[in-house]
Image (cartoon, rainbow, N blue to C red):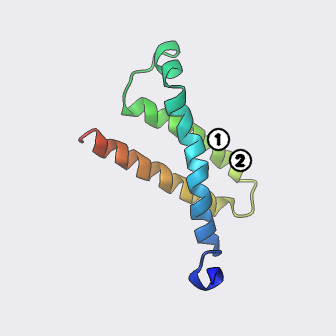
Amino acid sequence: LAPMLGYDRPTAVAIRLSRALYRACAVPADKNRAFYLQTCGLPDNFQTWFAVTQLHVWMLMVRLRLEPDGRRITQEVVNRFFEDAEEKIREAGV
């Protein structure tokens, strides 16, 4: 049934993988927030969150270059990143 519904198609697999991979990139910005704000002296704003998360996404992208389906997965991780950014902008009332 899964093949008939496209569950195992490369794009569907990349989308599923990207969710977990993006979460791993997004967690450091929240988990280590005190470090970035107090130790590094970064301001508590959207730009700081964006920069820290983008750095982690970039490191993942470099690693994914080695994978056969890395380009597709990278694109989906970037899609998750921008979905999250849009949500944070909405939450801020912008």
Please tell me the numbered disc located at residue 7.
none
Q: How many marks?
A: 2
Q: Are marks 1 and 2 in contact (CB under 8 Å)?
A: yes
Q: Residue at x 52, y 13 (%)?
A: 39
Q: Along the line of sight, which residue is nearer the eye, 31 or 59? A: 31
Work out which quarter of the rendered image holds the C terminus and state it: top left
Q: Quadrant of the image for the N terminus?
A: bottom right
Cα–Cα gap, marks 1 and 2: 7 Å
Q: Secondary structure at mark 2?
A: helix
* Residue at figure coordinates x 70%, y 53% from the top left: 65
- Residue at the disc numbered 1: 59
Q: Position of residue 16 (x, y in %)?
A: 59, 62
Position of residue 85 measured from the top left corner of the image (x, y, whole percent): 40, 45
Answer above or below: position of 15 versus 93.
below
**Callout 1 crowding tier (Cα within 10 Å): few <14, some 14–19, many ≥20:** few
The one of 68 and 24 positioned closer to us in this rendering: 24
Secondary structure of the residue carrying tag 1 is helix
Say whether residue 44 is visible: yes
Q: Position of residue 40 (x, y in %)?
A: 51, 16
Identify which amino acid the numbered label 2 is placed on.
Arg
The image position of residue 93, as x and y in percent, is 23, 41
Give the camera-side residue of 87 and 68.
87
Q: Which residue is mark 2?
A: 63
